[in-house]
């Protein structure tokens, strides 16, 4: 199957090296989860795919188009194909849910679409993330729960009919019930739309349940790449150390929430 997203020997430094020769291919329709320690370059890979950052060296392709070498028009076309789901939802506090979701359309589309068509597209995007338009469309983000805000952010990414979805920590700060709901939405959207998904996450159980493959970044490189089953069975000390740290963190969180 052809790669929809590819990274080829990508290097990126800020004050210190962050990515040191990362190569990855994500097939059309695949769900790939990126895991690793904080500050390891996972979110940087997402921003490179959108052209929000440029690599120091290496290539990034989206559907065959070189992102670093793209013209302004080509980059605009790439971004039309890619939806970005922010870690904190990144909703506009002063806008209604309807207006926030509509922001997922490009200015040229917003200027050309009729009010009736816009309403239909916003409503369909909200329904796809299990939100009732009549109940939430005129609310502002502060009136929503954390889980609902995450889903509004996802609806904004969906309204543009993206072929690639980039998720930056989609279940951070969510309780287990809402986290499981978002994870089901991610897999359901892939099944219905055939979109390619890259998910940056610290939630290992969720990643194992959602993903076709797991990529573990360590010291700026892809240390492990394989199926969830291979990740679970791996005896590699870096993989095991990372998994054990995540298990310890989850136990600590569970203990902190237990009654004294």
Image (cartoon, helix red, strand yellow):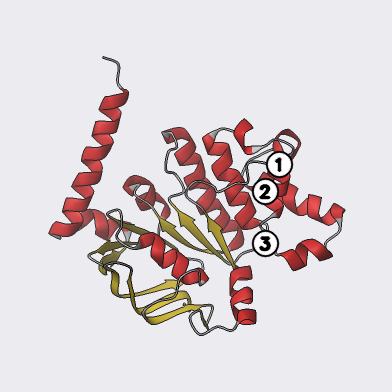
Q: Residue at x 57, y 40 (%)?
A: 149
Residue 220, image x and y in percent? Answer: 26, 68
Q: Is residue 148 among what the camera can see?
A: yes
Q: Dot 2: within a 10 Å radius of its alpha carbon, few (fewer than 14), some, or many (20 or more) residues?
A: many
Residue projecting furthest to the front? 15
Left or right: where does residue 100 sit relative to residue 68? Answer: right
Q: Depth check: 179 or 210 in front? A: 179
Residue 54, image x and y in percent? Answer: 44, 75
Disc 2 and disc 1 in contact, CB within 8 angstroms = yes
Residue 103, image x and y in percent? Answer: 68, 55
Disc on the earlier residue, 2 or 3: 2
For discs 2 and 3, the disc positioned in front in the rendered view: 2
Q: Quadrant of residue 257?
A: top left
Left or right: where does residue 42 sit relative to residue 109? Answer: left
Secondary element at image label 1:
loop
> Residue beneath label 1, please?
96
Secondary element at image label 3:
loop
Question: How much space separates mark 1 and mark 3, taking CA atoms?
Answer: 18 Å
Disc 1 and disc 3 in contact, CB within 8 angstroms = no
Q: Dot 1: within a 10 Å radius of its alpha carbon, few (fewer than 14), some, or many (20 or more) residues?
A: some
Q: Quadrant of the C terminus?
A: top left
Q: Is residue 235 among what the camera can see?
A: no
Disc on the earlier residue, 1 or 3: 1
> Residue beneath label 2, please?
100
Q: Quadrant of residue 200?
A: bottom left
Which mark, residue 160?
3
Q: Quadrant of residue 36?
A: bottom left
């Amino acid at each position: 199957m052809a790669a929809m997203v590819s990274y080829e020997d990508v290097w990126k430094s800020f004050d210190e090296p962050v990515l040191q020769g990362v190569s990855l291919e994500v097939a059309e329709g695949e769900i790939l989860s990126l895991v690793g320690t904080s500050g390891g370059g996972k979110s940087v890979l997402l921003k490179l795919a959108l052209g929000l950052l440029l690599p120091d060296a290496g290539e990034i392709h989206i559907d065959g188009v070189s992102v670093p070498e793209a013209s302004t028009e080509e980059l605009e076309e790439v971004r039309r194909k890619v939806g970005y789901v922010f870690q904190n939802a990144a909703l506009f506090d002063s806008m209604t849910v309807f207006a926030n979701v509509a922001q997922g359309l490009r200015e040229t589309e917003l200027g050309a679409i009729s009010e009736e068509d816009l309403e239909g597209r916003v409503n369909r995007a909200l329904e796809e993330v299990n939100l009732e338009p009549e109940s939430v469309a005129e609310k502002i983000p502060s009136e929503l729960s954390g889980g609902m805000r995450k889903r509004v952010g996802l609806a904004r990414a969906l309204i543009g009919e993206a072929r690639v979805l980039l998720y930056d920590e989609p279940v951070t700060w969510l309780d287990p019930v809402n986290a499981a709901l978002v994870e089901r939405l991610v897999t359901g959207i892939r099944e219905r739309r055939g979109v390619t998904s890259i998910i940056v996450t610290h939630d290992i159980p969720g990643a194992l349940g959602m993903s076709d493959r797991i990529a573990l970044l360590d010291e700026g490189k892809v240390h492990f790449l394989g199926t969830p089953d291979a990740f679970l069975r791996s005896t590699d000390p870096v993989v095991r150390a990372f998994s054990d740290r995540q298990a310890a963190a989850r136990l600590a969180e569970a203990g902190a929430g237990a009654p004294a």
